[in-house]
Amino acid sequence: MLYPELFKSLERVRWHMDRDIPWDNFDPARLSDEQARTIKMNAITEWAALPATEMFLRDNVDDSDFSAFMSVWFFEEQKHSLVLMEYLQRFRPDLVPTEEELHAVRFHFDPAPAQETLMLHFCGEIRLNHWYRCAAEWHTEPVIQHIYRLISRDEARHAGAYLQYMRRMIDKLGDEARSAFARIGMLMASSARSSKPLHPTNLHVNASLFPNDTVQSRLPEPEWLEHWLDQQIRFGKEWEAKVVGMILTNLSLLFDRTIGTVQELNRYRKELGRAKTAEPSTA
């Protein structure tokens, strides 16, 4: 089982809201209204760990190890939402999300293959790590800068934990898991070609609710994410290249071969497809 050691490793580096955040260093002159509103939106999107956890537990009902790990992941992700709300409660109480605004992002996700969902969220954690690091540089108020750095490191650790479960899936399922990881990796690493960044918060997850079936669509300001990335924190090509590079580096380790570009990943994906087609029939 992976859960016991993952629990210990994450427990050793866990931060606490009361002693690890320099609340007394708050500088009101360095927090703009614009910045404060983005903190509210991030608090609501982090709350979406709730329906994601419900999805993971449903779709991994046969995997008690991974389901137990969800207890750690869910706790830490909800704490991200909580610490952002605590910041607002202390310094901008007028912007604390309402219970209704938080509940709006809790909705049913359609079932999906466990391998693909795991890979999607692995990439999502890498992306969040970089988004929050970029946000920490954009913000000018020191306490919220510190908070964004803390939660960005959490996201990186979560990606590392997911990677361990991905290795275990490959050990169990072989090329079936490799194909799923390569396919979703292609999707997530090719986001520079699309009109929006790809992340679990803006992907459609419930056909019956379309088009209001993304976390982003259920925010008080549905267009906020792209505006935050493009106009505020300015998550540009250099940052995006870091995200793609980190995804490809980890896939290289996972697949035990060098994958330096999206094109190389696509070729590997096609190789796996050809190998599957060439398998002799057992009928």
Image (cartoon, rainbow, N blue to C red):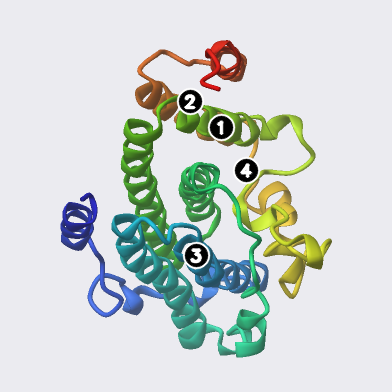
Q: Is residue 14 left or right of residue 210?
A: left
Residue displayed at 65% across by 37% down: 236
What residue sits 60% from the left and 74% below the top?
Answer: 40
Report, in whole angstroms, how far the alpha carbon at label 2 lies from the one at label 4: 19 Å
Looking at the image, residue 147 sits to the left or right of residue 42; the answer is left
Q: Residues within 10 Å of mark 3 (few under 14, many from 20)?
A: few
- Residue sitting nearer the eye, 274 or 33: 274
Report, in whole angstroms, how far the alpha carbon at label 3 lies from the one at label 2. 29 Å
Query: Residues under labels 1 and 4: Cα distance?
Result: 20 Å
Whether label 1 touches label 2, CB < 8 Å: yes
**Dot 3 and dot 4 residues touching (CB under 8 Å):** no
* Nearer the camera: disc 3 or disc 1: 3
Mark 1 or 4, which is nearer the eye?
Answer: 1
Does label 3 or label 2 sit earlier along the sequence? 3
Residues at marks 3 and 1 touching, judged by CB atoms closer than 8 Å: no
Residue marked by disc 1: 185
Circle 1 SS class: helix
Image position of 122 with respect to 212: above or below: above
Q: From the viewer's side, name the closer residue of 202 and 237.
A: 202
Mark 4 Cα within 10 Å, few/some/many (few <14, many 20+)?
A: some
Amino acid bearing label 3: Arg
Q: Reply above or below: 119 against 227.
A: above
Q: Nearer the viewer, mark 1 or mark 2?
A: 1
Where is residue 219 drawn, in percent x and y?
A: 71, 71
C-alpha separation, residue under disc 1 versus residue under disc 2? 8 Å
Distance from disc 3 to disc 1, alpha carbons, whole Å, reads 23 Å
The dot on residue 235 is 4
Rendering quarter of residue 65:
bottom left
Q: Identify the mark nearer the N-term, 3 or 1.
A: 3
Task: State the residue position of label 2.
Answer: 248
For label 3, the residue is: 58
Amino acid on which disc 2 is placed = Leu
